[in-house]
Amino acid sequence: MMKDQSPMTLLTRRRFAVAAAGMASMLASPFVAPGLQTAQARAADLGKAARAFTRLRTVQVQRGDDLVLAETLQGPGLNRAANIKSCSKSIVALLLGIAIDRNEVPGVDAPLIEVAPGLVPPDATPGVERLTLQDLVTMRAGLESTSGRNYGAWVNSRDWVGHALRRPMVARPGGRMVYSTGSTHVLGAALAEAAGASLLSQARSRLGEPLGIDIPGWTRDPQGFYLGGNQMALTPQAMLRIAATVRDRGRFGGVQVVPRHWIEASAQPRTRSPWSGLGYGYGWFLSKTGYMIARGYGGQIIAAHPERDLAVAITSDPDRPARSQGYFGELMAFLDGPVLQAAQARS
């Protein structure tokens, strides 16, 4: 059975507070006067902070065009593909923006039933006919989640799209966030139908080629649709290029790969995660400190900070959960502490 990368049960607030305090103290200590640091000292301090994590596999921090830190701490190296888990959801969101720009779908407010009518089963849950692509990409479809305890039954069903669209409504479409890989999978299938090209083909031609990265094939459902929202694999170096592209508002190597307006719209919070408290735009988590974050089970992270000119890629042990008030919270402390402080240091 494949593991979903949905948020898991939280640690108690007391335990997290103690852990976070210890982590903050440990990570903050080398950064007393970041404005006085040289680039070499900055890299050394970042590396020291990164090595404090026992589950971290690779970490890269890029400021502008300068690679401040690039380390393999364990496992495969920076040029070996790693399962990015739910970071896949953010990739699908980028492909939606590109498809809209190509007029393959009329817009983010387009109803699913108009974009891909063949995907909606006759016995779909009442209310599905009102679902828009925006509801799907922002996790506000209102349908019961296919993640967590429901994930196994979903991926063992004969029709993943139909199964997701037959889940009962637990919230108003367009209302609160209901984290569900099924929502992103339906969106990916809709993009495949609208563009007349598989999600893999779109990912390779619209992101892979202009960014100069390889995108291997990944899991498909019984109908042949590539899983939208899980199991995609990228090298950490490829993850960093995606982070840099998002940081630079969709531009890479002098080419506008993703529409600038889509990246800017994706950075606007449409809802908020009940687990982490992070905002959520078009497929990207949004921190109060200015990061746009793709987050995957186990601690896989693609992060962009446009204002600080930062791009970050992190891979971790993919087989252990990274709870919002556990390991993922510690990674956020790393991003908000040492990484942001390093961006203030002198070259």
Image: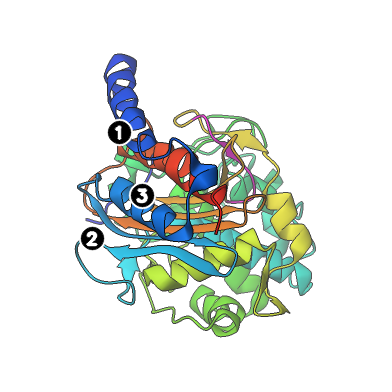
* Along the line of sight, the residue nearer the viewer: 311 or 80: 311
Is the stretch drawn in magenta largely helix, strand or loop? loop
The amino acid at mark 3 is Asp
Crowd around label 2: few <14 · some 14–19 · many ≥20 (10 Å): some
297 left or right, relative to 98: left
Compared to residue 142, the image places residue 122 above or below, namely below
Residue to which mark 3 is pinned: 45
Residue interval drawn in magenta: 277-283
Which of disc 3 and disc 2 is earlier in sequence? 3
The amino acid at mark 2 is Leu
Marks 2/3: CA–CA distance = 15 Å
Find residue 172 and report its horizontal and vertical position in percent. 63, 31
Q: Which is in the foreground here, disc 2 or disc 1?
A: 1
Residue to which mark 2 is pinned: 73
Residue to which mark 1 is pinned: 26
306 left or right, relative to 275: right
Compared to residue 79, the image places residue 149 above or below, namely above
Query: Is residue 311 shown in magenta?
Result: no
